[in-house]
Image (spheres, rainbow, N blue to C red):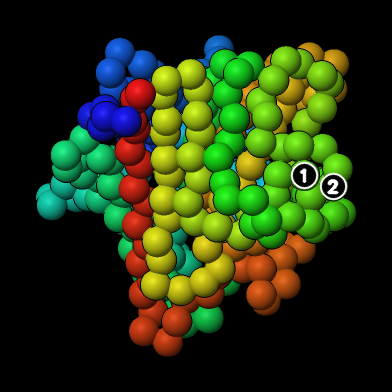
Amino acid sequence: MSAVGLKVLTDLEHGGRWTSLSGGGREWLWHRDEPRRAGAAPGDEFADAGGLEECFPTISGAPDHGEVWARPWARRADGAAMVATERYELTRTLTEAGGVVVADYRLAADPGFGFLWAAHALLDLSEQARVVVPAGVSTTVFEDADPIATGPWPAPAGTRLDLLGAADGSATAATLATGEVTVADGADRLTLRLEADAEPVSTALWRNLEGWPAGAPYRSVGIEPMLGRAFDLAKAGPDAQARVPASGEMAWRLSVWAERE
């Protein structure tokens, strides 16, 4: 395998979203035409335009996909981007070193502030692509943000979730108890690794093979590094959400890199 350098582009005005993650002639982020996205405001229903959206302080529930995806982010003098409310300040610093994209996050909030965060990355993958995770990793399948089954990867509830094949009318949301996931698609590999100074670190999988939304389904695959092990903060127990420590600050790092055979 040879390393393939990645470049990232973002749109701070529209939620700090990642609009491109490319390298070696390949664009990794999937997109769809969604006219509601440009005018989205806090509290709006999620407008699924693809790319990578920052979901915080919840992923599903209220507000849909969190608050910060629909808020403008500000560029600081040191190059970092930030979004703030009366309850928190979330800062992200993006760098590209040796072809690896690194996003360093820092959250300032009151001690004990509970939250969920996800890098909601929707990837442009073929029907031959697969998700590469060590066999046996604990995986929980959700329905309407409620856990319905937990078992070992890759088939925690009987269906293999690592295969991203042809449309079959299914849509599955799951969390994996690991901070590192690779997707393999032909000769290409993309790896996302999340490291944090506190637990729980996990990865969400959205495996939508034209099973969602009802009436007008389409295909979308999300590999979403996350802090927490639930989708809806209102339904997440103490062990399923992240919590700001006594210092009032919490940090985490997302690293993304690509390789090619």
The secondary structure type at the circle numbered 2 is loop
Residue at which label 1 appears: 155
Q: Quadrant of residue 90?
A: bottom left
Amino acid under disc 2: Ala
Could you tell whether 219 is left or right of 213 in the image? left
Mark 1 touches mark 2? (CB < 8 Å): yes
- The image shows residue 112 at horizontal and vertical percentages of 53, 81
Q: Which mark is residue 126?
A: none
Q: Identify which residue is drawn at 59% across, 30% down.
A: 130
Could you tell whether 165 is left or right of 5 in the image? right
Q: Identify which residue is drawn at 42% across, 30% down.
A: 189
The quadrant of the rendering that contains the C terminus is top left
The quadrant of the rendering that contains the N terminus is top left
| Residue 175 vertical position relative to residue 35 in the rendered view, above or below | below
| Residue 111 vertical position relative to residue 141 in the rendered view, above or below | below
| Residue 238 vertical position relative to residue 234 in the rendered view, above or below | below
The secondary structure type at the circle numbered 1 is loop
Q: Mark 1 Cα within 10 Å, few/some/many (few <14, many 20+)? A: some
State the residue in front, 153 or 220.
Answer: 153
- The image shows residue 241 at horizontal and vertical percentages of 61, 68
Q: Identify which residue is drawn at 36% across, 84% down.
A: 247
Q: Identify which residue is drawn at 30% across, 13% down.
A: 25
Residue at which label 2 appears: 157
Q: Mark 2 Cα within 10 Å, few/some/many (few <14, many 20+)? A: some
Could you tell whether 58 is left or right of 147 in the image? left
For residue 62, say whether it is visible: no
| Residue 189 vertical position relative to residue 243 in the rendered view, above or below | above
For residue 94, say whether it is visible: yes
Q: Quadrant of residue 107?
A: bottom left
